[in-house]
């Protein structure tokens, strides 16, 4: 999150539009959490889980695409600078790896009674 805030708040960038990437951080785990509720215990993949992975991949790609679109359009006067785009990319990588690590760490349903 620090890299994302730096991409928005540094004096040479000073533009808070990249902060809209937070929406993608909040949306990315939702399809996987929903598909876990309906996963069969057979060990094979099912359509619900595959659809959740597809939607999650689209959300993650959108999180990387938004800064590129903001840095490119309009071509004469871009909304953000490329330095801010790089900081948002670094923040995206750190945040999505943290979310992925959470799912790997808490994937097991080991209930100790």
Image (cartoon, grey):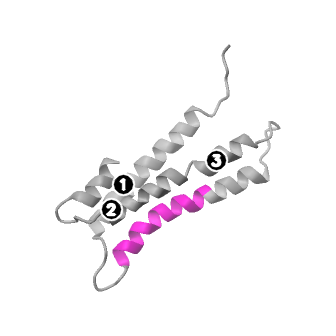
The location of residue 54, given as percent across then percent down, is: 65, 59
Taking depth in this image into account, of 29 and 108 the one nearest to the observer is 29
The reply to whether dot 3 and dot 1 touch (C-beta < 8 Å) is no
Q: Is residue 82 magenta?
A: no
The location of residue 111, given as percent across then percent down, is: 67, 21
Q: Is residue 59 magenta?
A: yes
Image depth: mark 3 or mark 1 in front? 3
Magenta span main SS? helix
Q: Residue at x 36, y 54 (%)?
A: 90
Q: Residue at x 72, y 54 (%)?
A: 50
Label placed on residue 4: none
* Count of all numbered marks drawn on residues in the image: 3
Where does label 3 land, which residue? 32
The location of residue 105, given as percent across then percent down, is: 56, 32
SS label for mark 2: helix
Q: CA distance from mark 1 to mark 2?
A: 6 Å
Q: Quadrant of residue 110?
A: top right
Q: CA distance from mark 3 to mark 1?
A: 23 Å
Direction from residue 19 to residue 53 in the image, left or right: right
SS label for mark 1: helix
Relative to residue 68, is residue 43 depicted above or below?
A: above
Label placed on residue 90: 1
The reply to whether dot 1 and dot 2 touch (C-beta < 8 Å) is yes
Q: CA distance from mark 2 to mark 3?
A: 28 Å
Start-end of magenta stretch: 56-72
Direction from residue 70 to residue 98 in the image, left or right: right
The reply to whether dot 2 and dot 3 touch (C-beta < 8 Å) is no
Where does label 2 land, which residue? 86
């Amino acid at each position: 999150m620090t890299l994302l805030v730096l991409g928005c708040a540094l004096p040479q960038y000073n533009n808070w539009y990249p902060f809209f990437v937070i929406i993608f951080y909040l949306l990315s785990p939702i399809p996987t959490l929903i598909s876990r509720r309906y996963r069969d215990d057979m060990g094979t993949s099912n359509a619900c889980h595959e659809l959740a992975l597809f939607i999650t991949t689209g959300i993650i790609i959108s999180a990387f695409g938004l800064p590129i679109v903001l840095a490119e359009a309009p071509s004469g006067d871009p909304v953000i600078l490329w330095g801010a785009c790089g900081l948002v990319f670094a923040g995206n990588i750190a945040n999505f790896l943290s979310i992925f690590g959470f799912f790997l760490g808490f994937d097991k349903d080991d209930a100790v009674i």
